[in-house]
Amino acid sequence: MASATGMGADIVSERCMVPPQAASKRQADTGVKREVRIMVWLLKCRGSTPAVGAVQALHARSAFGCSRIKKFCQSKEEPIMRGARKIAGLMLCLLLGAGSAGAASVETYAGLCDASAGFALGANHFVVVDNEHNVLTLYKTGQARPVRVFPLHAFLGTDEDDDSDLEAAAVVGDRVYIVSSHGRTSGGKEKGRRHRFFAVDIDPARLSVSPVGKPYKKLQRDLLATPALDDLRLKAAAKLPPEQRDGFNIEGLAAADSGLLIGFRNPLVGGKAILVPLDNPAAVIKGKTARFGAPILIDLGGRGIRGIERVGKEYVIAAGPVADDGTFALYRWSGASTDAPVAFGTDAIAGMKPEGLFELPGTTAVRILSDDGDVRYGERVCKDVPAARKQFRNVVVTP
């Protein structure tokens, strides 16, 4: 896992987001916001990795924006703290820094808010799927700003400013399958552009992502027409808004021994989350009707699936509420329908909304992406601020 020390300050300092009230009134930079800026500076300049994660999570949840860490760290003359404030800050640094050296630390990347899925592109780069735009965004680890963007609207057959609510991705060799939610809008309207299942081929050496085959638009139809899935009540779910109780919402996709696993955020069945095996993904992107295996129900504490990734022979699951209110959790799962998932990593995702996750090449570590579209910055949420101010958080954990 990349340490926040050394690279963390660069990540956050490249992405300074100051709330409107602080930007327009310098004197507004007081109180709790100022204290958080000071604490983050202290922790960054002294390299306390566990403390950095804790304070970054605090200031992200409180919508204080990012601190001017780079300026403070580079300036020897900055009279940041005096007297009691300095002592208090140093004590906090020591207390928080007493955690284990391997504790997860939050990183912040720029350019988008709604990180819904992702996948590695070699050892040092990764691609993020954004559910508000039909693009794939390439990042270099430790570099806040995107390296490049891969537009998908032409391939998906949508307008440039439309979105298909892309929600999940699964890597199989050098191919990545991506699926949209297949749900209605929040207002209950049916939108054909939200029905997409497709694939891209990746070349890590060239940092390239190339669409392959054809986008498939009938995945939901095939699900509803499969008798073995009738007990899931998907036909009724498809008529409801995605976050309404018993609505229809796909948000997970993972590799399996034979094909893929499709994970549902909504509906639940008896309080359990749904996984449906897709047996022929390679044929589907050639236009063939999708074939499904027997569904699997897993107990995630009344949560739905927000993301799922195969790690070795097992799975890591990001679970969350079917609507907006509720808690998130991470689980390890063997993949066997008879085995119960085991929760882990609660502290690592404190204050985050984990939706995307992917294995880091050559390791058993997983990068967790937070969908920060609804994080507030002043009077507006992240998805509504100018593009130059958008950002999302992520953290690397080892199951």
Image: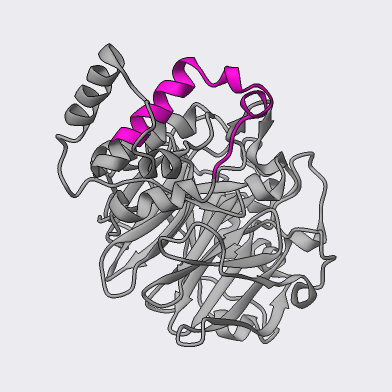
Residue 379 in the image: state x and y as whole percent.
68, 26
Q: Is residue 192 above or below residue 32?
A: below
Magenta span has 302? Answer: no
Q: Would you identify the image quadrant in which residue 23 lies? A: top right
Residue 291 in the image: state x and y as whole percent.
58, 75
Q: Is residue 16 above or below residue 157?
A: above
Q: Would you identify the image quadrant in which residue 398 lies? A: bottom left
Q: Nearer the viewer, residue 371 or 168?
A: 371
User: What segment carries the magenta color?
Assistant: 16-42
Q: Which corner quadrant holds the N terminus? A: bottom left
Q: Main secondary structure of the magenta part?
A: helix
Q: Residue at x 65, y 34 (%)?
A: 381
Residue 137 in the image: state x and y as whole percent.
59, 66
Q: Nearer the viewer, residue 2 or 151?
A: 2
Q: Is residue 300 above or below residue 77?
A: below
Quick check: 331 left or right of 115? left
Quick check: 253 left or right of 107? right
Q: Nearer the viewer, residue 34 or 218?
A: 34
Q: Residue at x 80, y 59 (%)?
A: 162
